[in-house]
């Protein structure tokens, strides 16, 4: 293996959403990740081929029935060799399986134990079920997304699950791993999606305190309120985006669009924004998206076409950068960021749940007789 995390060993207790995304990021960067899967896989992935489970790429799958006697001890033997364990269950679930932090850190005092939840390990909501939209709602973030005269618009599950969740956990884990390298001691990383979502809005909280952020949805610079920062429909029904916030960029936008009317001088007068947005909407509907690209793309107007899922991988810039890759016929985002000296290898395809059970366990020091005994006891699937 190569990559900046080559040599780092990770045990991932399989979950949904944020935790697998964190494990994917670590594997993308060269970490050796064993994915402890449910026997037979989760309910969602039973519906599709393993190759479509993009977030499972880059790691081998070991199927273990964690409810069977002896299962926890098998996992602890993996934990003893690992740098990192990560899990995404509700608080207390790992403890009930005999795999809580105290037990794992007793077996491996240098272990970084990463925990991913929606609400955190404690607090009044710690045991409540939830999803991305609930976490970003409580964090105050969802309120700011959407049109002012409509309910908030769910931004897929990008903010809570992946930005405020998986990426936050990956950051926390690597911080703790760095510290363990100096102190020789591991620790627990408590990553909560609600808290990560709030953290992503740090700039906006500063603006609010300074009186520069209004509490009404769709009334601010970057939430759809400003005429110079948003998306507009074109003559062909496709859309473009502009973000001419700085004075020099706004001046260039006016020049390229021929906006000589003095009414556009009031760039930051939010009382005029609805009128100016309507004016720009009319202008952008006079040309097709391709025509606007020919005029504006690549300039300092801060412009990009709004590409759909079919178009984005084919854009010349994205192709030049290798932003998307193909693995077993599945187009997906490439690992990021880039490294000049230790680039990671191309990710291996996702494994079917349990497909690597015997080989992965042998590579981590389990002898064949023990593997056979675990299969016979039902901890492992038969014939692995």
Image: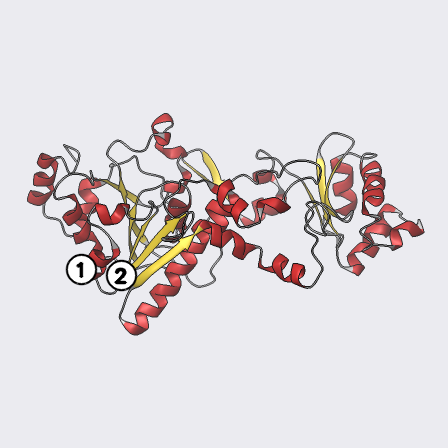
Q: Position of residue 218 (x, y in %)?
A: 70, 45
Q: Position of residue 141 (x, y in %)?
A: 58, 48
**Residue 93 picture quarter:** top left
**Residue 57 picture quarter:** top left
Tell me the SS state at disc 2. Answer: loop
How crowded pointer 1 is (Cα within 10 Å; few <14, some 14-19, many 20+) is rated as some
Q: Residue furthest bottom?
A: 182
Q: Residue at x 84, y 36 (%)?
A: 282
- The residue tagged 2 is 111
Residue 81 visible in the shown view: no
Q: Position of residue 86 (x, y in %)?
A: 32, 51
- The residue tagged 1 is 107
Q: Which residue is at the front of the view, 38 or 252?
A: 38
Q: Which residue is at the front of the view, 53 or 84?
A: 84
Tell me the SS state at disc 1. Answer: helix
Q: Separation of disc 1 and disc 2 at Cα? A: 9 Å
């Amino acid at each position: 293996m190569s990559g900046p995390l080559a040599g780092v060993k990770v045990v991932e207790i399989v979950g949904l959403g944020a935790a697998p995304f964190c494990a994917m990021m670590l594997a993308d960067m060269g970490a050796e990740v064993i994915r402890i899967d449910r026997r037979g896989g989760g309910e969602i992935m039973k519906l599709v081929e393993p190759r479509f489970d993009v977030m499972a790429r880059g790691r081998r799958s070991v199927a273990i029935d964690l409810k069977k006697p002896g299962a926890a001890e098998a996992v602890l033997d993996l934990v003893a060799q690992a740098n990192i364990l990560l899990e995404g269950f509700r608080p207390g679930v790992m403890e009930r399986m005999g795999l809580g932090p105290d037990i794992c850190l007793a077996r491996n005092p240098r272990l970084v134990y990463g925990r991913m939840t929606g609400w955190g390990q404690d607090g009044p909501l710690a045991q409540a079920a939830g999803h991305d939209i609930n976490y970003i709602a409580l964090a105050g973030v969802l309120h700011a997304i959407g049109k002012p005269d409509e309910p908030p618009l769910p931004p897929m599950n990008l903010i809570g699950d992946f930005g405020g969740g998986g990426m936050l956990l990956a950051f926390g884990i690597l911080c703790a791993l760095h510290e363990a390298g100096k102190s020789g001691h591991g620790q627990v990383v408590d990553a909560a999606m609600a808290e990560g979502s709030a953290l992503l809005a740090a700039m906006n909280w500063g603006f609010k305190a300074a009186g520069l952020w209004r509490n009404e949805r769709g009334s601010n610079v970057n939430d759809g309120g400003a005429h110079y920062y948003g998306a507009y429909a074109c003559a062909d029904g496709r859309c473009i985006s502009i973000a001419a916030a700085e004075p020099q960029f706004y001046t260039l936008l006016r020049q390229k669009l021929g906006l000589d009317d003095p009414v556009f001088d009031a760039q930051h007068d939010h009382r005029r924004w609805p009128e100016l947005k309507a004016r720009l909407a009319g202008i952008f509907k006079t040309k097709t998206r391709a025509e606007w690209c020919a005029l504006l793309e690549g300039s300092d107007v801060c412009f990009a076409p709004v590409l759909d899922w079919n178009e984005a991988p084919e854009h010349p810039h994205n192709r030049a950068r290798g932003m998307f890759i193909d693995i077993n016929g599945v187009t997906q985002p490439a690992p990021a960021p880039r490294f000049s000296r230790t680039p990671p290898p191309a990710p291996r395809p996702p494994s079917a749940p349990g497909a690597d059970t015997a080989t992965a366990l042998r590579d981590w020091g389990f002898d064949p007789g023990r593997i056979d005994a675990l299969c016979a006891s039902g901890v492992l699937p038969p014939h692995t």
